[in-house]
Amino acid sequence: VSASTIGAHLTQLRQQCGGVKATQTTAASLRTALSALKQHIAVKGSDGYLGAISSGTPGCTGQRNSGICVKYAGYISNGQDTFDTIKWAKQVNEAAEDMERHDAAVRDWQQLAEALKVKTAEAWQAAAEAKVLATTRADRQTQTRSQETPPNLQRQEAEEKCNKIDKETDCAANPKCAWNGEAKSPNKRCTLSEDGEKEAEKEETGKGAEGKPECSCHQNQNLFEAVNKDGKKYCGWRSGRDNEKKKVKF
């Protein structure tokens, strides 16, 4: 049979079988195809034959009495087939292995991408929480500072005013000062009296003698309301009523 005749027969056969729908090749489909093809290899003696074997001598020479087949001499070795050593079978197996490595790399990449997505979300969440904590901490610090008793500046200033007086008569004339003639330092002979200390503390803290806020020392509504920080109403502010020229503090 000539090559042209074989070609014509194959063309006719392909046309009769019709087209094959394109499918995506995978490592699994390649291995399945190899396994199916392997089942078509007939074994005679130690040789393998793929194709139609004539009742004549199976020489696979293309002659009419030799059959249209491919002979794999020594296909059986030590009781085992050598299918995987056939060149085209080996190449298909290698292609399947390459595809499996590629698929594994894709899965790893997808897992890393998902992990990165999760970590990115966690980082943004942590940043948001840190911002909230920082804001809360700053607010608390501000609130704490606002609630802390300020430095005793009024007492210091009152003490310095008394220390500047160098005469006993002038010191006695100021009810906030007291004279101590035995003081070693001349600048400490006129010092802040007990009444002066109480007055300075009253001006500094806004509290009266019993520890309660002294409302009369505050001059605006904000200062009045600030002393009510513990939830108790010590001071209040109201606008002047009818026939009142000034706002009333109580």
Image (tube, rainbow, N blue to C red):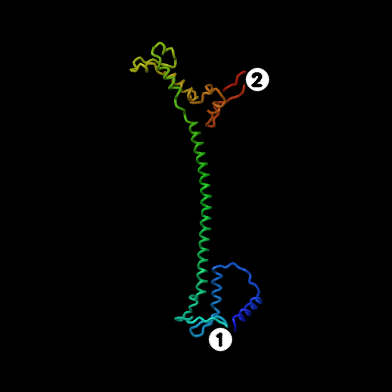
Q: Position of residue 212 (x, y in %)?
A: 50, 26
Going by the numbered disc 2, the residue's amino acid type is Asp
Q: Position of residue 214 (x, y in %)?
A: 51, 23
Going by the numbered disc 1, the residue's amino acid type is Ser
Q: How many marks?
A: 2
**Image height check: is 69 above or below 22?**
below
Say which quadrant the C terminus sits in.
Answer: top right
- Circle 2 sits in a helix, a strand or a loop, which is it? loop
- Circle 1 sits in a helix, a strand or a loop, which is it? loop
Say which quadrant the N terminus sits in.
Answer: bottom right
Q: Residue at x 50, y 34 (%)?
A: 142
Q: Residue at x 52, y 83 (%)?
A: 43
Q: Residue at x 44, y 14 (%)?
A: 174
Q: Position of residue 83 (x, y in %)?
A: 50, 77
User: Which residue is at the front of the view, 108 or 190?
Assistant: 108
Residue with the most extreme bottom position: 56
The label on residue 242 is 2
Mark 1 vs mark 2, CA separation in Å: 131 Å
Residue topped by disc 1:
66
Q: Residue at x 50, y 73 (%)?
A: 90
